[in-house]
Image: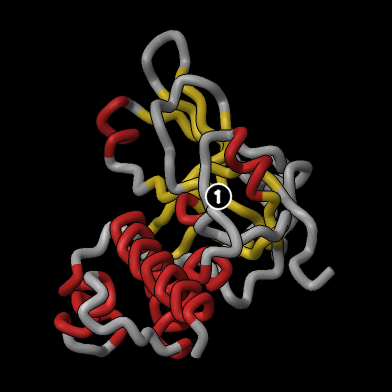
């Protein structure tokens, strides 16, 4: 191996090691938690991150990308964005919807903040229909303006509009008032709601 190739390989190893560590921290994982998620020993994660073992196998980088929910592009140093350089990306491996990460950034969101669910009834017809795939944000925030939320009752998740009235009570509202009714909730009843996300819209199909 020539001196220039050796230097290039060393720089690539240092780059990948630093990016592995940064991606792990971004995923909120300790070395122990990362190792458990990948099914390897903690020492292996530590050795690669600290360049004790400088020969990082491609297969291990693939495991890191999956465990840390980042792209191989990032780990190899081809992009500085965790999710990679593609404009549209699905939020799950088998997602039917792809999202523009730049548009998400403008909303203060990342792919990790989102979930994809199937609409279970026709209560919000007009916004979306039963059976459609929609995206919700797990960053719910303070509920002070009318919006549509995903609410879990027992084992079922439904989409309902929610707004706070001037009187201090809350209204769960629907669009399809021929089949469903609005519901008024006291402050105590509102606090008992299991709100899992806020509807943020539809995006293009991931299969396109």
Q: Position of residue 207 (x, y in %)?
A: 79, 72
Please indicate, yes or no, whether residue 120 appears anywhere in the rendered image.
no
Residue that extends furthest to the front in the rendered view of this protein: 3
Which residue is labeled 1 in the image? 136
Image-based side of 26 in relation to 163, left or right: left
Q: Position of residue 192 (x, y in %)?
A: 28, 42
Q: For this rendering, which residue is in front, 94 or 62?
A: 62
Q: For this rendering, which residue is in front, 174 or 115?
A: 115
Q: Residue at horizontal 74%, vertical 52%?
A: 203
Image-based side of 52 in relation to 158, left or right: left
Above or below, 50 relative to 165:
below
Residue 36, by quadrant, is: bottom left
Above or below, 99 relative to 167:
below
Q: Position of residue 23 (x, y in %)?
A: 38, 61
Tag 1: Cα neighbours inside 10 Å, few (<14), some, or many (≥20)?
many
Q: How is the image coloured?
A: secondary structure
Dot 1 falls on a residue whose secondary structure is: strand
Please indicate, yes or no, whether residue 188 appears anywhere in the rendered image.
yes
Q: For this rendering, which residue is in front, 123 or 195?
A: 195
Residue 86, by quadrant, is: bottom right
Above or below, 143 relative to 48:
above
Residue that extends furthest to the right in the rendered view of this protein: 208
Image-based side of 41 in relation to 156, left or right: left
Q: Residue at horizontal 52%, vertical 42%?
A: 109
Q: Residue at horizontal 19%, vertical 70%?
A: 31
Q: Position of residue 106 (x, y in %)?
A: 61, 33
Image-based side of 70 in relation to 50, left or right: right
Q: Residue at horizontal 70%, vertical 63%?
A: 97
Above or below, 86 relative to 162:
below
The quadrant of the picture occupied by the C terminus is: bottom right
């Amino acid at each position: 191996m020539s001196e220039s190739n050796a230097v290039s390989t060393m720089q690539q190893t240092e780059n990948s090691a630093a990016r592995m560590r940064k991606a792990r921290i971004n995923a909120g994982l300790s070395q122990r938690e990362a190792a458990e998620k990948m099914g390897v020993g903690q020492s292996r994660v530590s050795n690669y991150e600290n360049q004790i073992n400088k020969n990082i196998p491609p297969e291990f980088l693939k495991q890191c990308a999956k465990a840390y929910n980042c792209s191989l592009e990032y780990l190899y140093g081809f992009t500085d964005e965790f999710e990679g350089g593609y404009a549209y990306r699905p939020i799950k491996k088998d997602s039917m919807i792809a999202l523009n990460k730049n548009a998400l950034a403008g909303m203060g969101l990342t792919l990790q903040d989102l979930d994809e669910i199937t609409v279970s009834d026709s209560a919000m017809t007009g916004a979306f229909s039963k059976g459609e795939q929609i995206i919700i944000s797990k960053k719910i925030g303070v509920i002070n303006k009318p919006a549509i939320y995903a609410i879990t009752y027992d084992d079922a998740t439904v989409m309902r509009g929610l707004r706070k009235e001037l009187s201090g009570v809350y209204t769960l509202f629907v669009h399809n008032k021929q089949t469903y009714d609005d519901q008024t909730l006291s402050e105590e009843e509102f606090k008992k709601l299991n709100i899992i996300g806020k509807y943020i819209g539809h995006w293009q199909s991931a299969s396109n």
